[in-house]
Amino acid sequence: MRKWEKIQIVRNVSSSWFALGIDVIVGILLSPFILHRLGDAAFGIWVLIFSITGYYGLLDLGIRSSIVRYVSKFAATDDIQDFAKLINTSLFSYSCIGDLSLLVTVVGSLYVDSSFKIPPQLQSDARWLLLMVGTAVGLGFPLGVAGGVLDGLQRFYVNNWTSVAQNIVRAVLIFIALTHGQGLLTVAFITVVLPLITSVIRTIIALRVRPVRFALKYVDRATFRMMANYSGVTLIIMIAGRLKFKTDTIVIGSMLSPAAITYFSIGSRIVNYAGEVVTALAQTLLPMASHSEATGNKDRLRKVFVAGNRFCAFTIFPITATLLILGKSVIEVWVGKKYVATSYPILVILIIPSTLMWAQAASGRVLFGISKHRAWAFVTLAEGICNLILSILLVRPYGIIGDALGTAIPLTCSMVFFMPGHLCRQLGIRVQTYLREAYILPLIITAPLVLALLLMQRWFVAHNYWQLGIQLLICGMVYTLGLGWAFLTNNALRIGQLADKENSKPSEISLVASAVESYQQDA
């Protein structure tokens, strides 16, 4: 790996984690403030409407992923003509999709109060909230092209720093609004307008980094077909993702109550925060995988897969251990003690299968990068359908815990029985080799942290931010020592023989061995 690539990766990942850190801090401080100011029912409607409009993402049709994929490819080949066709065709497609989403919003606002169990005094706010959020999402489709271009150019840090500014401004404005007696709609207006402004700023930056010609003649059918062939499979994965992670609040809202959504969302949001840390790391791997595939460097592709998942495990294993052991204290300190009994079981049920998924976050990015995500698309779609069916069947007898189980069971099955074997077959790696190289070291380094967490829990139970901060600081130091040892001894970067010799040609084996040796020396 060349020096500039390493610098680019460090810049992208560090800015992603910093942006995520700001997002988490804002969420930790702002969410309980909004919850207690608005009340359980209004906060539940807030979560419900944003979950409904989250389905608008399906109208993306996978175009965003194709933008990242082909911007990376055309930038590498310096193909100005195809680059212009890609951007113009994407803008035209997104403009049509934005118009459709506005129409859906108007129609949906007429029926939102009768479709869900919304208290009469909040029905008007629910309609206006849907109109406001849906309109912003519709405008965000064409404005979001710039974000995909920046990702494809591996300028993740531009998107990250603009997100930081957006989150800080949003937190300040919402705090001012609620302390001056404003309500749900004002908070929503602040929340949806700032991303639009951020998208405009990103567009200006993207045009400076990579100028592009704009004209109707660049709206090209062949380019659209190319994008459709790639994004059609991506759309299936997006549909499955909505079924897996966006149906819970709708099922709970239609079969239980808005207040129940609040209790569920507390546990699930903590889990989502944990996943975002890994996602910030894994998203940088897609352009790397695409570049390796385009240049025919399969050995580098294997290393992106194994090393990427190893670093995902380095990231998610300590977070999962901390949430399982200190999760009750986290919920009590964050939103209050009354939410612990109901929300902590949701956290536990969701965090375990989610850890299996996030520890393999690099796998999905590699599949996207090499355009081999068709089989995964249909498996994850089946998982999403099972998720929805199980959630509906279990929510009545078991409440929100049943809904969480409906998510956890199919996710565990797909992550254990499909994903590892599928990727290893695609890349010519033995499953046991992959599991050993990717996960043994992260498990060893996490073990002292688990011991420290258990000892800290026996010493005292945290009931405020200071006590929880002390526990996290001490345990964080323990994990940092282990991780530091892994990097200082080069164990964190060292990767053994990956190619399956039985399925490799002799010349390929020699090439792989030589590449591994040079990679280790460089590391």
Image (cartoon, rainbow, N blue to C red):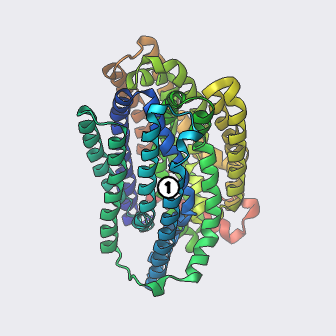
Residue identifier under label 1: 106
Residue sticking out furthest to the bottom: 217
Q: Position of residue 270 (x, y in %)?
A: 47, 34
The part of the image, by quadrant, that contains residue 66 is: bottom right
Frontmost residue, 282 versus 22:
22
Q: Tell me what residue is drawn at x 42 percent, y 12 percent.
A: 459
Question: How many numbered tags mark residues here?
Answer: 1
Q: Is residue 71 left or right of residue 244?
A: left
Frontmost residue, 211 versus 467:
211
Task: Name the quarter where the C terminus is drawn.
Answer: bottom left
Q: Tell me what residue is drawn at x 65 percent, y 61 percent.
A: 373
Which amino acid type corresponds to the residue marked 1 in the rendered image?
Answer: Val
Task: Name the quarter where the N terminus is drawn.
Answer: bottom left
Q: Is residue 159 above or below residue 243?
A: below
Instruction: Characterize the local packing of mark 1: few (<14), some (14-19) or many (20 or more) Cα atoms within 10 angstroms.
Output: some
Q: Secondary structure at mark 1?
A: helix
